[in-house]
Image (cartoon, rainbow, N blue to C red):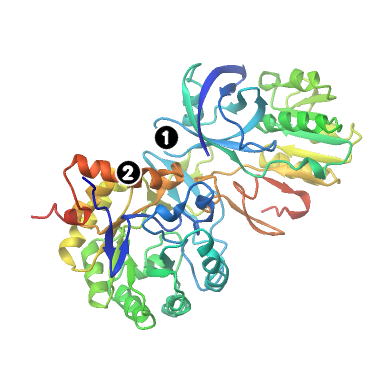
Amino acid sequence: MGVDISVSLSGLTLDNPVIPASGCFGYGKEFSELYDINILGSFSIKGTTKHPRFGNPTPRIAETPSGMLNAVGLQNPGIDVVATNHLAYMGRYFNKKVIANISGFSIEEFVYCAQKLDSIEQIGIIEVNISCPNVHGGGIAFGTDANSAAEVTRAVKAVTKKPIYIKLSPNVTDITEIAVACENAGADGLSLINTLLGMRIDLKKRRPLLANKTGGLSGPAVFPVALRMVYQVYEAVKIPIMGMGGISSAADVIEMMMAGASAVQIGAATLKNPYICKEIIERLPLEAERLRITNLKDIIGVAHL
Amino acid sequence: MVVKYRILSNTHIAKDIYEMCLSGNTEKITNSGQFINIQLDGFFLRRPISVCDITDDGLIIIYKILGDGTRYMSTLSAGDKLDAVTGLGNGFDIKKSGNKPLLIGGGVGVPPLYLLAKRLIAVGKTPSVILGFGCADEVFYKESFEALGCETVVTTVDGSMGVKGFVTDAVKGFDYDYIFTCGPPLMLKAVYDKTQTDGQFSFEERMACAIGACMGCTCRTKKGYKRLCKDGPVLSREEIIWE
């Protein structure tokens, strides 16, 4: 009896592998008003850039079969405000290490953000988003080319002592090529997958439904794609993987870990059910026991021969 | 908080318009103009629907069939359960109202004004009401507002009931010192342009989380970026930026 559901990421021990994904949990404040978010393994803050951003015009959200599209476009108040306000006050409602998600439109912007965060005690991991599909001229541009991905990785790694996890895009021909490039450039781990590029058309208006025309697909619809990519990347690299994409149950968490994830992030499901992470954490030991798992760490990558 | 409501009735009250009575906890709903976010089987995102009235053991919502989700809602019947996140949004602030408020609703923008009217009456500020619709078949709740004691004028675009034209064509007939309005964006803009008093405008937008976390429904205002789900859906005249 008693299932050990703790996991470890680059020397950081998490009570459980459940981590709300960036962009789906804000800075945690709204959810802390619903339940004690200290039960989480950790969470990844809203993607932050050097300069404040409004993001894209609305509509930014569209529904899809078993999922949704978003084209928020990295709305955030800028790294300086996030560091001095949001992160400084986070301790009032969250007392664990947090994952800081950063993005940029140039190497210099990624570096600026990483430097700014390096001395903040509460940050356990810096997650480098080179895969946002909803901004133009940055974001995903770094994540679809192995050389650029390696260059960002090296530059960020050089200015911070924190572990850095590179968040990869699924919108590439071969995700393992990018993953290996990041590993070779010094990444401590990888986060995958970001959203898949998609779109919908408003039939009455005969125009794209999203103001940005395209958006990122997430939700249960993408789970098998995410699982496949985590599985492939696990075989290609030695660094730990945070697996994400459509996870919405304790069984999904276990499946993603069997594919090779050391921890998981939960995105779209938190938007549909704000209590989903709490429910999954409560369910996880029972689900593990049902599958005769005594230590969750034992199943990481177990699906590989 | 998430509440499992029980459907007491789901009644077709006008063209494509349904009134649904729900039984369940309403303690988080403090203001008129707030909304609940409803989960529907087979649909990923919840549907945000404004609160029309608070009853002894629950609430009433009114919705229009606008897509597959609301069409599915119209097939639900008494006894069915409905999972909803409740008490969302800022709602109307009646403390800011003058003594002679005018409520202007268009289509499915009408429902939140009903609870608002009751709350205003409770503090001795009985409002006048303009309800705008496309045609007579679409009109609902005229008698309900009249039963509260509100002077109520209906406008229809085709003139099949009440004043022919838009809500703004009926405004000049009223003596008012404050407005509360909810309706389609073009109507809100027209009301903004054709009235001068202070007022509160309730907007709608496609939402995902509806609790202020995902930034899916942000708009620019003169007081900075606001999330319509959390900092809205009600904005004051002085902060609105039309884009």
Q: Using the image as rendered, state which of residue A29 and residue A285 is in the foreground.
A: A285
Quadrant position of residue B63? top right
Amino acid type, residue under disc 2 in the picture: Ala
Going by the image, does B139 lie left or right of A80?
right
Quadrant position of residue B21? top right
Amino acid type, residue under disc 1 in the picture: Phe
The location of residue A88, given as percent across then percent down, is: 54, 69
Q: Using the image as rendered, state which of residue A55 and residue B162 is in the foreground.
A: A55
For mark 2, give the secondary structure: helix
Up/down of A81 relative to B172, above or below: below
Mark drawn on residue A234: none
User: Residue at the spot x=60%, y=31% of the render?
Assistant: B26
Q: Residues within 10 Å of mark 1 (few under 14, many from 20)?
A: some
Up/down of B38 relative to A271, above or below: above
Task: Count the numbered circles shown.
Answer: 2
According to the picture, the residue beneath numbered tag 1 turns out to be B43
Question: The C terminus of chain B is located in which quarter?
Answer: bottom right
The location of residue B92, given as percent across then percent down, is: 72, 41
Q: Using the image as rendered, state which of residue B78 and residue A153 is in the foreground.
A: B78
For mark 1, give the secondary structure: loop
Q: Report whether mark 1 lies on the same chain as mark 2.
A: no
Q: Chain of mark 2?
A: A
Distance (Cα) linking label 1 and label 2 = 12 Å
Going by the image, does B38 lie left or right of B196?
left
Residue B212 visible, this orientation: yes
User: Residue at the spot x=24%, y=73% of the render?
Assistant: A183
The location of residue A51, given as percent across then percent down, is: 54, 72
Going by the image, does B73 lie left or right of B193?
left
According to the picture, the residue beneath numbered tag 2 turns out to be A221
